[in-house]
Amino acid sequence: MISFSAVFIFIVVMYLVSSVKILSEYERGVIFRLGRLLPQPKGPGIVLVFVPIDRLVKISLRVIALDVPPQDIITKDNVSVKVNAVVYFRVMDPNKAVLAVEDYLFATSQMSQTTLRSVLGQSDMDELLSSREKINQHLQEILDRQTDPWGVKVSNVELKHVDLAPEMIRAMARQAEAERERRAKVIHAEGELQASEKLSQAAAVMAKEPISVQLRYLQTLVDIASEHNSTTIFPVPIDLIKMFLKMPAEDGK
């Protein structure tokens, strides 16, 4: 017959075995003893939790990648877009993550969504598309400051997708095409200006040496002849025509 002492020892052994908890290297245990928080988190390794006196809350210290769902945002220049992002954060103080907020994962997610709408609502569409690195840095600083009382450290924020309405995409395409045409016209005008300056300089040099005009004329004829044209048209200097016009007048005398 089993004695009472043996049963008692068996119950004590089973209680001690059930009180042993093992925490991984990336986990910390926040223990409440009789409702009061123990000063230091426990772990990693073997931790004794005496139920029902103690209550253990496990907190992971690994970096968490939080996917922020698409948010409908109206930018500063009244453009409607959908933007989603990813937030990287980790728990730095397990005690604060348990005491300061009911659910730090849910709270960080909601804070990320509201901050995303607030910050992007103050940005222009062009800034949203061209200055993502600056916006990411600004979002990270705001979220890190807001989650610091919860013992959470936001290390990085990245905008993933910026979805535009089809009519907005067409409008931006027309704007880009107009911008390219403007640049082409400016470059053409600059080329004309530089060419006119060079022609002016060349005319000044030819004015000093009249024979250079004749040399240039002969060079032009050579260039025309090298094209293998069936018909060649070349200019005749007006001075040469004047010489033939004067000849009959001299014969009449």
Image: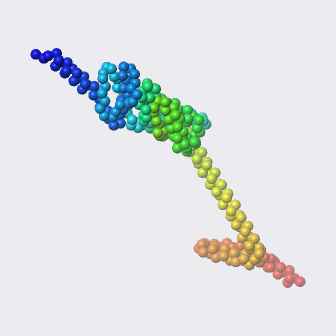
Left or right of 101? Residue 138 is right
Where residue 76 sits, quadrant-wise, is top right
Q: Is residue 131 above or below residue 113?
A: below
- Percent across and percent down for residue 34 are 36, 19
Toward the right, the furthest residue is: 253
The image shows a total of numbered marks equal to 0
> Can I make out residue 169 in this image?
no
Residue 228 to residue 157: above or below: below
Q: Residue furthest left?
A: 1
- Residue 170 picture location, percent across and down: 55, 42
Of residues 197 and 236, which is closer to you in this image? Answer: 197
Q: Residue at x 37, y 33 (%)?
A: 60
Please report the residue visible at 54 percent of the width from the left and 42 percent of the height from the top: 134
Q: Which of these two is toward me, 73 or 222?
A: 73
Would residue 203 be found to the left or right of residue 139 on screen? right
- Residue 208 visible, this orientation: yes
The relative height of residue 139 versus residue 6 in the rendered view (above or below) is below
What x and y, as percent, mark residue 220?
66, 74
Please identify the quadrant where the N terminus is shown: top left
Q: Residue 50, located in which quarter of the rendered image? A: top left
